[in-house]
Image: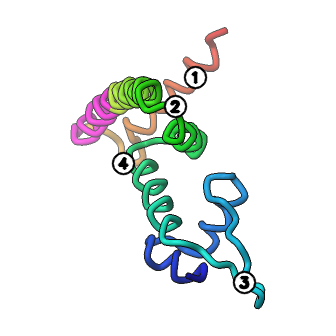
Amino acid sequence: MRIGEVASRAGVNVETLRYYERRGLLREPERQPSGYRSYGQESVRLVRFIKRAQELGFTLSDIADLLRLADGNRAESCREVRGLAAAKVDDIDRRMATLGAMRASLVALVETCGRGGRRRRECPLLEAIEDEDRAARREP
């Protein structure tokens, strides 16, 4: 199958396939005498795997490790994949905590905007951001 068909079946564009080849995630296919690349059905499965792993938060470097592990000893690979997934869960938990704190700060700032009694050109939200910036510049 040609590159366009693989891309279509996998739900990506042709440049994505070429990029995966350059990164070593996808083997460069055999070329037909006409010069066209000839991909097998396995390429579609592999690209779908890569996209799904990305949706789960894995980087392309992580995915290269996952693909390498998939070719190894199943028992050892499973333990290593579990470790990678557990590390990803920890990373997501840290990000969620950071986002939660950011959200709480923004909610508090938005609530200050609703309070009356200010001159028209004052904005407590902008002032609070400037105050944070000033405080950050004072810290060593």
Q: In the shown orientation, is residue 10 left or right of residue 63?
A: left
Q: Position of residue 131 (x, y in %)?
A: 50, 25
The residue where tag 4 is placed is 120
In the rendered image, residue 35 lying in the magenta stretch gets the answer no
The residue where tag 1 is placed is 134
- Separation of disc 2 and disc 4 at Cα? 18 Å
Question: Tag 1: residue type?
Answer: Arg
Q: Earlier in the sequence, mark 3 or mark 1?
A: 3
Q: Can you tell which mark lies on residue 130? A: 2
Q: In the shown orientation, is residue 111 left or right of residue 58?
A: left
Disc 2 crowd rating (10 Å Cα; few below 14, some 14-19, many 20+) is few
Chain part drawn in magenta: 100-116
Question: Tag 2: residue type?
Answer: Glu
- Separation of disc 3 and disc 4 at Cα? 71 Å
- Separation of disc 3 and disc 2 at Cα? 62 Å
- Any part of residue 98 in sight: no
Question: Are the residues flagged by discs 1 and 4 in contact, CB closer than 8 Å?
Answer: no
Q: Position of residue 138 (x, y in %)?
A: 63, 13
Which corner quadrant holds the C terminus? top right
Q: In the shown orientation, is residue 59 left or right of residue 22?
A: left
